[in-house]
Image (spheres, rainbow, N blue to C red):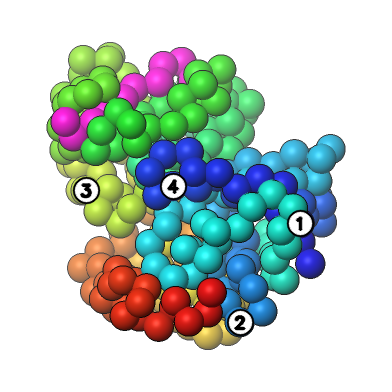
């Protein structure tokens, strides 16, 4: 059993989840993920690693409460235990001195892009961070990004913080901020990564996305997480989760990603999940 050190809602529906898992901290790298279960009958949930503390033996992830399984996770508290916490899984992010790197995070991707930004900063890159959300109250971790970023830029749909609008404004923002990135890293929802990849392809800047398909075992056995990259079938769990955003078949990925949308968003009392509490 793995002890929960902390579980707290940091903004509406987004939870910071810290688990005592010293064996994971010994091997985890930026870009890795873990798979966990909330209880013995729970489904396997993949979560990107957002931070870790080798001395304390703890690993932190950010998750979005959507359906029954994440609702179970959101009910847990410090001192509770979970039966499964497997990782680190996936390939680590490519870390090198690229020059100037723009790291973009939205929703749970703000958390998962943090260790990548930190590692890029430590590798000698000039790192800029752009945090995207619908409104100011959905932004978080700005204080963690500031020490590793030359600048933290905010982009909100309603204009309550930073620039107003969506990621389609990126070329304009880069011009206004006088940033010429050699590489862009984007973590977050499918729409954010897809739109960013479309914009940056026109700019000619290599863009790395952190893919979040449906996943079961996380070791390449089930094939559920497959996607098409540069015309070839890839498994996000073992070939990724990072891929070149300009090579992803986004239309196919969206269709596969939406397979269980109805089951995820319908009320718990109708989905049957409530019977597990």
Which one is earlier in the sequence, the residue at label 1 or at label 2? 1
The residue wearing badge 3 is 195
Is 193 on the left or on the right of 210, as rendered? left
Do the residues bearing badges 4 and 3 touch, measured as CB atoms within 8 Å? no
Res 262 label: none
- Give x and y (percent) for residue 163: 21, 23
Residue occupying the point 50% across, 47% down: 15
Query: Magenta span covers which residues?
Result: 149-158
Which one is earlier in the sequence, the residue at label 2 or at label 4? 4
Label 1, label 3: how many angstroms apart (C-alpha)?
Answer: 38 Å
Q: Is residue 173 above or below residue 265?
A: above
Q: Nearer the viewer, mark 1 or mark 3?
A: 1
Do the residues bearing badges 1 and 4 touch, measured as CB atoms within 8 Å? no
Label 4, label 3: how many angstroms apart (C-alpha)?
Answer: 22 Å
Label 2, label 4: how many angstroms apart (C-alpha)?
Answer: 23 Å
The residue wearing badge 4 is 14
The residue wearing badge 1 is 3
Mark 3: secondary structure: helix
Residue 81: name its quadrant: bottom right
Which one is earlier in the sequence, the residue at label 4 or at label 3? 4
The residue wearing badge 2 is 41
Magenta-colored segment: predominant secondary structure: strand
Q: Name the quarter where the C terminus is drawn.
A: bottom right
Is 193 on the left or on the right of 117, as rendered? left
């Amino acid at each position: 059993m793995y002890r929960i050190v902390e579980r707290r809602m940091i903004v509406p529906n987004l939870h910071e989840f810290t688990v005592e898992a010293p064996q994971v901290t010994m091997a985890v790298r930026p870009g890795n993920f873990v798979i966990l279960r909330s209880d013995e009958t729970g489904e396997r949930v993949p979560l990107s690693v957002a931070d870790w503390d080798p001395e304390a033996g703890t690993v932190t992830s950010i998750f979005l409460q959507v359906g029954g399984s994440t609702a179970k996770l959101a009910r847990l508290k410090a001192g509770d235990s979970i039966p499964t916490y497997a990782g680190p899984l996936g390939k680590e992010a490519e870390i090198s001195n690229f020059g100037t790197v723009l790291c973009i995070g939205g929703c749970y991707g703000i958390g998962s892009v943090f260790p990548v930004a930190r590692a890029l900063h430590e590798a000698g890159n000039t790192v800029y961070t752009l945090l995207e959300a619908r409104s100011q109250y959905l932004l978080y971790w700005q204080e963690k990004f500031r020490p590793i970023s030359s600048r933290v830029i905010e982009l909100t749909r309603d204009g309550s913080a930073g620039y107003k609008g969506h990621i389609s404004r990126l070329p304009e923002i880069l011009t206004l901020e006088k940033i010429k990135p050699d590489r862009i890293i984007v973590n977050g929802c499918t729409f954010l990564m897809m739109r960013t990849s479309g914009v940056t392809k026109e700019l000619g800047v290599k863009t790395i996305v952190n893919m979040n398909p449906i996943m079961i075992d996380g070791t390449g056995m089930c094939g559920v997480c497959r996607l098409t990259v540069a015309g070839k079938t890839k498994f996000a769990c073992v070939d990724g989760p990072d891929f070149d955003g300009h090579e992803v078949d986004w239309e196919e990925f969206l269709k596969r990603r939406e397979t269980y949308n109805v089951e995820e968003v319908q009320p718990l009392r109708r989905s049957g999940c409530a019977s597990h509490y």
